[in-house]
Amino acid sequence: MTTDRGRRVAPALARARRRGRAMKELVGRVASNKMMKTVTVVVERLFRHPRLKRFVRARKKYAAHDEENACNPGDLVRLRHSRPLSKTKRWVVDEILKRERQFDREAVNAAVKERVRTEKMERAAGSRGFAASGAADADATGKAV
């Protein structure tokens, strides 16, 4: 399909434009990226309940195609509707709007273990009556002050 400017566009998009409406888009958070080239996205919507007359928050999970495996849990993404890619996938990640902060778990765990170890040594040295540093309290003759 070509547009009036001569650019090629997807057939579904061309049909949608002819009908006067754009392709469906959703914005949601990535819940899981444990599958290859697939992410699970949670989309929240707020609506007024017809009988209760209160605002209700509804969540729905969508399986979306992520070609580069670029999404991580917590990322805010925009989904675009597409042809069926599998039994459950009908959406494609169009863009990542906001990335979630990533932590290096190994580095954080190592830092916590080191801190716990030093605190245990300080407590043990304090209970025995010794200074934690050992040689810091000795005078020039080598005797403890």
Image (cartoon, grey):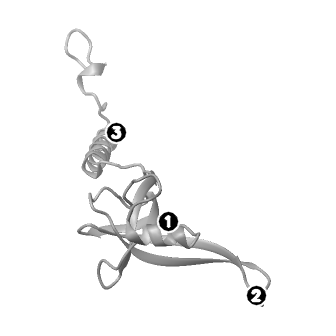
- Res. 110 visible in picture: yes
Q: Position of residue 49 (x, y in %)?
A: 73, 84
Graded by Cα atoms within 10 Å as few (under 14), some (14 to 19) or many (20 or more), the crowding at tag 3 reads few
Residue that carries the numbered disc 1 in the rendered image: 28
Residue that carries the numbered disc 2 in the rendered image: 50
Q: Amino acid at mark 1?
A: Gly
- Alpha carbon of mark 1 to alpha carbon of mark 2: how far? 24 Å
Residue 80 vertical position relative to residue 5 in the rendered view, above or below: below
Q: Position of residue 105 (x, y in %)?
A: 29, 52
Secondary structure category for the residue under label 2: loop
Q: Position of residue 134 (x, y in %)?
A: 25, 27
- Res. 81 visible in picture: no
Residue that carries the numbered disc 3 in the rendered image: 126
**Between 42 and 24, the one nearer to me in the picture:** 24
Place residue 30 in its image quadrant: bottom left
Residue 121 vertical position relative to residue 29 in the rendered view, above or below: above
Residue 97 vertical position relative to residue 35 in the rendered view, above or below: above
